[in-house]
Image (cartoon, coloured by chain):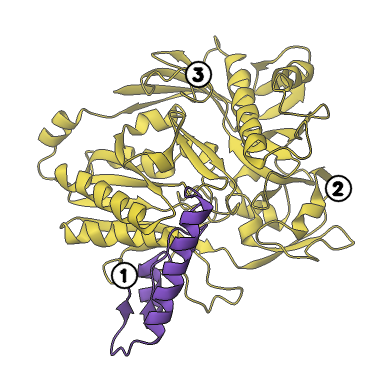
Chain colours: A yellow, B purple
Amino acid sequence: MKLELQKLNVKSLKFGDKTGFSDGVLAINKAELIALISEDPMLGKNIDADIAMPGESVRIMPVKDVIEPRWKIEGKGQVFPGMLSDVETVGEGKTLVLSGCAVLTAGKLVRFQEGIIDMSGPGADYTPYSKTCNVVLILEPSDPNMDKHDYETACRMAGLKAAAYLAKSCSGLQADSTEVYEMPKIRDAMNSYPELPKVGYIYMLQTQGLLHDTYLYGVDVKRILPTLISPLEVMDGAIVSGNCVSACDKNSTYSHLNNPVISDMLKRHGKDFNFVACIVTNENVTLADKRRSSSYATKLAAMLGLDGVVITEEGFGNPDADLIMNCRKSEQLGIKTALLTDEYAGQDGASQSLADSCPEGDACVTAGNANEVIKLPAMKKVIGYQEEANVIAGGWQGSLSDDGSITVELQAITGATSELGYTKLGAYTL
Amino acid sequence: MCTIVPISQTVGANRIVPTIAIPHPLGNPSKTPEEEKILRRSLVERALKALQTEITEQTVFTE
């Protein structure tokens, strides 16, 4: 399987007569974009679009999801299969990427677990989406009493539609850069690099229901048994976030598309290890489901004869139990593990970081303490509804001060403690 | 009473009664109200029995 990502490097955004790309500038026909989104009767009449650039004194909130514009220009299927397009298998051919650009779904809150993106100031360091040229959709439901699941679906589809539309409008141009990713067949991988350890990736997806959902080819992942997926399918949008879970550590659709665990493992394939397989699994709400999925995911890893796995979690709390089950069961099957998670160690950092743990989990990478408190100074412009700082996860009544500053836990900042490691901040032990 | 027994074990609970699911520990929306009442009563009775049982180590009450 081979996928070529043809990247146009977006350095600036502007509204214009025709949606298209030239000399690093993505022009957007705002009326056309809004007309496309407005086709959905679930969305209200007052929807709008705005743009936000890195370094500007702009706050965007509440943000539900972030999506990178992509469009397949060669090969089977289309981006976001089973969601925006047909269910045909993706991951082969050529895909156009508007690199450096992101679509943000914002506006009326779906649920309290949505995030803040500051384009400058101290908050900007904590979100990777302060570094992208952002096309912000400001959405509202057509009926204020609409079922939250229906509104979530409408927001999710609006983001995907806008992202696909923007990239499609730029097809036919010479790419600024090209990245080629290849994933060998398992048969070939097994016969390659006998001197290197065989490693896999157990990719945990948040699937607790009640608006904590992720989709695989349009299938609600809480209904799957763990299964194999090519990492290249992920780059074409086979995994879509439908999550309203704490903003800091929900995996945005953007971070799935750009999953750094996948790209780094592909880069190190054949050098440090033999990257054989990626296994997707879920995080459900009954003990039987957790036990079944962890047994099944680790069984797949054992069937493939893996020597080691990287396991990433999504969310926190009870998913820590899934993480630990995946870790312990892998180790019991003789498969070494490295875990990627974040922590909820209290505002002073003194509490137990994860809800569960095990002695086998002795190789663990943390993306930070989500309870750490940060003060975000006022921004000159707010896109969305700043007062939601008082109700979103990580905030409290009084988080928004009269002067427009916001005091919240990092939990409230979109992508601040990404458990895929899609962050701009890091730490080294000296 | 809790759904995710391993977490209760990790945090050191003495008597653990497993429940249905995280969003609805003592109920099950897929059942009829009559069936749910029977389910709830059985769980409460199990918890009361657990409280009356002498234990010497961390114990999960599955019946």
Please name the residue that numbered disc 2 is placed on. A380
Q: Secondary structure at mark 3?
A: loop
Please name the residue that numbered disc 3 is placed on. A85
Q: Callout 2: few (<14), some (14-19), or many (20+) C-alpha neighbours within 10 Å?
A: few
Q: Residue furthest top?
A: A172
Residue drawn 61% across and 33% down? A153
Specify the quadrant of the image occupied by residue B50. bottom left
Please name the residue that numbered disc 1 is placed on. B62
Report the Cα–Cα distance between label 1 and label 3.
46 Å
Residue A345: percent from left, percent from top = 53, 72
Same chain for labels 1 and 3? Say yes or no: no
Q: Give the total of numbered labels.
A: 3
- The residue lying toward the viewer, choosing from A129 and A323, is A323
The quadrant of the image that shows the N terminus of chain A is top left
Residue A145: percent from left, percent from top = 76, 40
Residue drawn 45% across and 49% down? A420
Chain label for disc 1:
B
Which numbered disc, 1 or 3, marks the residue closer to the eye? 1
Residue A426: percent from left, percent from top = 50, 58
Residue drawn 41% across and 68% down? B42
Q: Is residue B42 left or right of residue B54?
A: right
Q: Disc 3 or 2, which lies upstream in sequence? A: 3
Chain label for disc 3:
A
